[in-house]
């Protein structure tokens, strides 16, 4: 049966494979190499530039849209900062925290100090801007601008330069979009000073909004709800401001008006969607392709117009969220909708007093959500931890996300179940706190 | 990890490269020296490749600190691969002996 018996054609080589067999083996190996090369994505380029170079190979997973990818009602009315749940809690003095049980993992003195350290940093940089207010700290409105406007060679060049600068300052994701009245607060509200201002008080008329996202620590966010996760949130808030401030300063030094913005001035999620850095989700947070919902968002408003704008991109999050519902199941305050489909208006019985009504979405009850922050002494974040899009940056998760984007709906339910079986997205996990602090496998002196 | 030069994931993918090469060479050896046809060879090849993919999954899961995902990978990826490869190996053995 073997080629060794076929002596009449060619003599066998000493290794047991004749020349014809060797040629066949060579062809076989060549095919295998070609298949490997095809399966990989420009490997040399990928190795040289990291995750960014996978963009071209992922292009087929994304749908680009000319307009905002979710329906906005004709009778849509602009949202006021005063209507946010944060403002509601300020006005009604509802921020009442019970004393934490300091014997519980994630709430010990060390965890408390970790959280306070990060919030202290943020408060020094931006005061109370994470909850309320405007024109505070690094998000201030009045900064010197270079007298002469720099002329960019082309719109594409301007966009590339801005994005590279943003990445240099620490942004994980950057997108550029037009300023849009729909996503800007109609008026600004400072719950501490009890002051209101409008765009008429703003120092210039913005034309462009640069949406930015920074990644939050995976291990820290795995501990939700705890003060370790709180420290991740707070450190994120601090980083948001200095990254956005640095980019705004960069633009001001090029002669353009620019103001950094965190939770103030406008709504970050629709701007981030419009700028093409993520997709809308059931929990109301932005889900990004690289980091899922484990990001913090900020913006830079500028009067620079000569720039190439990004288009909104969707990659199947809506379809996945319709069947998954892990965030809604995990939410301890039951503040996330269990409805199957997005809707333009809230369903009957939903308290929409703090919602931006008239935009297609799943409806969340922000008051319930913030009340749980009070009750748990944390910023919660269990929805982020539970989301199947929240994964470490490892190859197998990028593979699964690609599969999810290509799979039809019913298989999403299967993928959700597998995500649970494989042990991802556990919340209230005391072991996660231990893992966060565990020195095993960490070398702090540069040896590993 | 590994002489203090390479990370775990780098060593893993190097070893996976070695395993994949050995698999292809082995399959080629069976085909060209023992004249085993594509039909009995296919389940063996599929089973071996699934097992290699399972090793990649399981070791990566342990490296990223998700051991439960690694254990589940053994059950739902490696075991089916082992069963398919065993069935294929029996057919190949019957043809090649």
Image: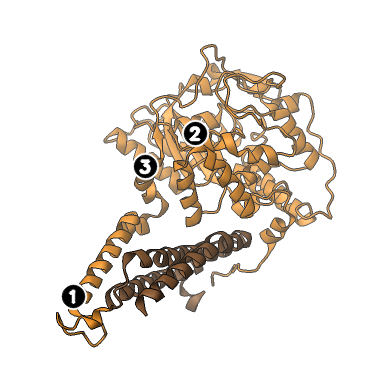
Chain colours: A orange, B brown
Vertical side of A185 occupied by B56: above or below:
below
- Between label 2 and label 3, give the one nearer the viewer: 3
Q: Which mark is residue A272?
A: 2
Residue beneath the point at 47% across and 56% down: A395
Q: Earlier in the sequence, mark 2 or mark 1?
A: 1
In this rendered view, identify the residue nearer to me: A114 or A107: A107
In this rendered view, identify the residue nearer to me: B42 or A224: B42
In this rendered view, identify the residue nearer to me: A303 or A6: A6
Q: Earlier in the sequence, mark 2 or mark 3?
A: 3
Q: Which mark is residue A59?
A: 3
Residue at disc 1, secondary structure: helix
Q: Is residue A4 visible?
A: yes
Chain letter behind tag 3: A
Q: Is residue A117 visible?
A: no
Same chain, labels 2 and 1:
yes
- Mark 1 sits on what residue? A20
Q: Report if the CB atoms under discs 2 and 1 are less than 8 Å apart.
A: no
Vertical side of A388 occupied by B7: above or below:
below
Most extreme residue toward the bottom, as rendered?
A14
Residue A438 falls left or right of residue A46: right
Residue beneath the point at 56% across and 51% down: A391
Where does the image place residue A206, in percent across and percent down from the top left?
A: 45, 24
Residue at disc 2, secondary structure: helix
Q: Quadrant of the N terminus of chain A?
A: bottom left
Most extreme residue toward the left, as rendered?
A9
Most extreme residue toward the top, as rendered?
A75
Where does the image place residue B35, in percent across and percent down from the top left?
A: 29, 74
Cα–Cα span, label 2 and label 3: 19 Å
């Amino acid at each position: 049966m073997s080629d060794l018996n076929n002596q009449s054609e060619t003599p066998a080589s000493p290794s047991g494979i004749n020349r014809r067999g060797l040629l066949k083996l060579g062809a076989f190996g060549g095919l295998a190499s070609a298949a490997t090369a095809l399966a990989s994505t420009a490997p040399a380029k990928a190795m040289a530039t990291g995750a960014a170079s996978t963009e071209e190979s992922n292009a087929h997973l994304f749908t680009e849209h000319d307009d905002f990818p979710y329906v906005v009602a004709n009778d849509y009315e602009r949202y006021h900062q005063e209507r946010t749940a944060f403002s509601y809690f300020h006005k009604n003095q509802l921020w009442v925290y019970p004393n934490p049980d300091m014997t519980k993992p994630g709430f010990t003195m060390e965890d408390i100090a970790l959280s306070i350290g990060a919030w202290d940093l943020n408060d020094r940089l931006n005061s109370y801007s994470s909850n309320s207010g405007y024109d505070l700290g690094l998000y201030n409105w009045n900064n010197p601008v270079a007298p002469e406007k720099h002329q960019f060679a082309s719109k594409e060049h301007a966009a590339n330069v801005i994005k590279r600068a943003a990445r240099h300052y620490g942004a994980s994701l950057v997108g550029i979009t037009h300023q849009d009245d729909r996503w800007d607060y109609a008026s600004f509200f400072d719950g501490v000073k009890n002051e209101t201002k409008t765009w008429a008080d703003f120092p210039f008329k913005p034309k462009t909004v640069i949406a930015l996202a920074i990644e939050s620590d995976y291990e820290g966010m795995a501990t939700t709800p705890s003060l370790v996760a709180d420290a991740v949130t707070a450190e994120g808030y601090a980083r948001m401001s200095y990254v956005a401030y640095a980019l705004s300063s960069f633009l001001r030094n090029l002669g353009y008006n620019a103001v950094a913005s965190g939770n103030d001035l406008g709504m970050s999620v629709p701007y981030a969607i419009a700028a093409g850095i993520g997709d809308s989700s059931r929990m109301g947070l932005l889900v990004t392709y690289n980091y899922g919902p484990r990001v913090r968002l900020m913006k830079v408003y500028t009067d620079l117009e000569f720039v190439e704008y990004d288009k909104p991109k969707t990659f199947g999050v809506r379809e996945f969220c319709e069947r998954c519902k892990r965030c809604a199941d995990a939410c301890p305050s039951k503040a996330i909708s269990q409805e199957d489909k997005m809707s333009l208006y809230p369903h009957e019985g939903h308290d929409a007093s703090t919602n931006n009504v008239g935009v297609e979405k799943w409806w969340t009850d922000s008051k319930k959500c913030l009340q749980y922050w009070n009750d748990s002494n944390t910023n919660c974040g269990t929805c982020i931890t539970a989301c199947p899009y929240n994964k470490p940056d490892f190859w197998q998760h990028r593979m699964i996300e690609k599969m999810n984007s290509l799979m039809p709906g019913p298989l999403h339910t299967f993928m959700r179940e597998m995500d649970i079986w494989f042990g991802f997205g556990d919340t209230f996990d005391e072991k996660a706190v231990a893992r966060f602090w565990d020195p095993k496998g960490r070398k702090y002196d540069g040896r590993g | 990890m590994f002489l203090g030069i390479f990370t775990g994931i780098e060593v893993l993918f190097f070893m996976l490269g070695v395993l994949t090469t050995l698999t292809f060479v082995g399959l080629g050896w069976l085909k060209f020296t023992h004249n085993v046809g594509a039909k009995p060879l296919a389940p063996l090849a599929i089973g071996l490749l699934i097992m290699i993919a399972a090793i990649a999954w399981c070791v990566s899961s342990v490296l990223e600190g998700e051991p439960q995902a690694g254990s589940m990978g053994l059950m739902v990826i490696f075991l089916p691969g082992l069963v398919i490869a065993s069935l294929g190996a029996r057919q190949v053995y019957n043809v090649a002996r």
